[in-house]
Amino acid sequence: MKKLLVVFAVAVSLAACNNAADTTADAKDSIDSVANEKIEAVDSTADQKMNQIDSTAEQAKDSLNKIDSAVKN
């Protein structure tokens, strides 16, 4: 009877675990994917702003060159 009780206790404890290791791994993967999406969004926004700044700087440089060439003439 004691052996049956031990087997029953082991079976109950395994059922109670409910694959906790899998859920931890799944949660970590989910968090990693969300973090990667956020990083990509920040990188994309930074690239867009950098391109905008570069474009503005080029326009300002062209304007100054036009003014400079007009003053020299």
Image: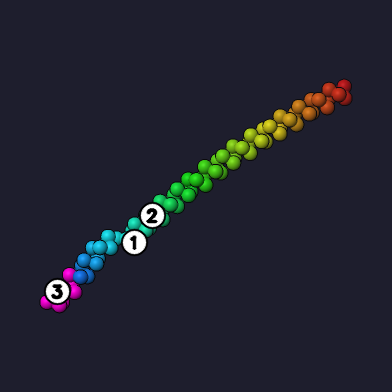
Q: Secondary structure at mark 1?
A: helix
Query: How many neighbours does mark 1 have within 10 angstroms: few (below 14), some (14-19), or many (20 or more)?
Result: few
Residue at the spot x=40%, y=51% of the render? 30
Q: CA distance from mark 1 to mark 3?
A: 27 Å
Secondary structure character of the magenta stretch overall: helix
First in sequence, mark 3 or 2: give its number: 3
Contact (Cβ within 8 Å) of mark 1 with mark 2:
no
State the image coordinates of residue 33 (x, y, percent, origin top left).
44, 49
Q: Which mark is residue 4?
A: 3
First in sequence, mark 1 or 2: give its number: 1
Q: Which mark is residue 27?
A: 2
Q: Amino acid at mark 1?
A: Ala
Count numbered badges in the picture: 3
Residue at the spot x=19%, y=74% of the render? 6
Q: CA distance from mark 1 to mark 2?
A: 10 Å
Contact (Cβ within 8 Å) of mark 1 with mark 3:
no
Q: Amino acid at mark 3?
A: Leu
Q: Is residue 46 above or below residue 9?
A: above
Q: Is residue 6 magenta?
A: yes
Quarter of image, res 19: bottom left
State the image coordinates of residue 41 (x, y, percent, origin top left).
52, 42
Query: How many neighbours does mark 2 have within 10 angstroms: few (below 14), some (14-19), or many (20 or more)?
Result: few
Residue at the spot x=67%, y=36% of the render? 54
Q: Which residues are magenta?
A: 1-8
Residue at the spot x=55%, y=43% of the render? 42
Q: CA distance from mark 3 to mark 2?
A: 36 Å
State the image coordinates of residue 73 (x, y, percent, origin top left).
87, 22
Q: Is residue 21 above or below residue 46?
A: below
Q: Is residue 15 above or below residue 2?
A: above
Q: Amino acid at mark 2?
A: Ala
